[in-house]
Image: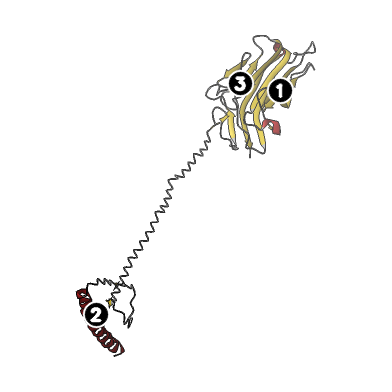
Amino acid sequence: MKAMKQILVTIALAVAIISLGCADTHLQMNDDLDGETDTDSDTDTGSDSDTDSDTDTDSDSDTDSDTDADSDSDTDADTDTDTDTDTDTDTDTDTGTDTVTDTDTVTDTDTGTDTGTDTGGSCSLPMTLATWDSGAEGWSYSPNWILQSTGGSPGGYMRFDDSPNKTGYSISLTSLVVDLSGCTSTTLHYDIKLDDYSDDDEWGDDEYIYVQCSGDGSSWSTLATYVDGDDWSDDSFGWTAYSHALPAGCRTATAYIRFLAQGDDSWYIDYWGIDEVSLSGS
């Protein structure tokens, strides 16, 4: 209602102003007839950019066209484009191939029954090194060692003979290599015999058999010694079994056993015999 009243008051004032304007125009026309040029261009085009209901009560001769056209065009084009592009690409590619190849091969080859070869790496005892019933069975020897097919204890055996005559001799009968590295104790077993002459050593000569072992094939340890003495007697003895413990130096991966015939003159004996060689232990 208050706004309406203001509008009506404004219209009334406008009508009064227009009436005054008309009267003023009439007076000016009269002045023109008198020869006076009165140019009063008082134009008030006040464009108040204001939303304001001014009540302009100006009683000047003034065409006050107070047009309050407050065009408050507030175009708030607030375009808030918030583009948050997160291209965080976390690529964790694990192409790790764990390959565990366990090729732990334990080869335990024990062919000691016939040849005396043990490549096991563990203690593969008991083991027969030789019977000589089916050949030399891998043992190495040279004259006067001779393989006999009969007369052994039993079957075949190895014989060191007096013929051909040897003087100042040292001739061995040696086994194949044997792996005893895994053994804490080892015992050598064998049979031995001597066939002697009753009047053999009249010149004081001695003939020997040494039973030996080695851990490398070059350094030898003597386990037993047998001798045909110079006592003008027959020192013969038949097949007899003996056993001897091997020292630690012979319990290696490259162990050997040998029988060494040594003496002054082989003619002072008939022969030595060796048979049934084996190892026991753990």
Q: Mark 2 points at which residue?
A: 24
**152 or 114: nearer the viewer:** 114
Q: Which of marks 1 and 2 is in front?
A: 2
**Percent position of residue 58, x then y:** 32, 81
> Marks 3 and 2, Cα distance to the nearest angstrom?
170 Å
Q: Quadrant of residue 49?
A: bottom left
Q: Quadrant of residue 3?
A: bottom left
Which amino acid lies under the numbered mark 1 shown in the image of this protein?
Tyr
> Marks 3 and 1, Cα distance to the nearest angstrom?
15 Å
**Percent position of residue 24, x then y:** 24, 80
Q: Which residue is drawn at 80% across and 13% down?
A: 204
**148 or 112: nearer the viewer:** 112
Q: Name the residue under label 3.
A: 158
Q: Nearer the viewer, mark 3 or mark 1?
A: 1
Q: Which of marks 1 and 2 is nearer the N terminus?
A: 2
Callout 1: few (<14), some (14-19), or many (20+) C-alpha neighbours within 10 Å? Answer: some
Which amino acid lies under the numbered mark 3 shown in the image of this protein?
Met
Q: Which of marks 3 and 2 is nearer the N terminus?
A: 2
Q: Mark 1 points at which residue?
A: 210
Which amino acid lies under the numbered mark 2 shown in the image of this protein?
Asp
227 vs 62, left or right, is: right
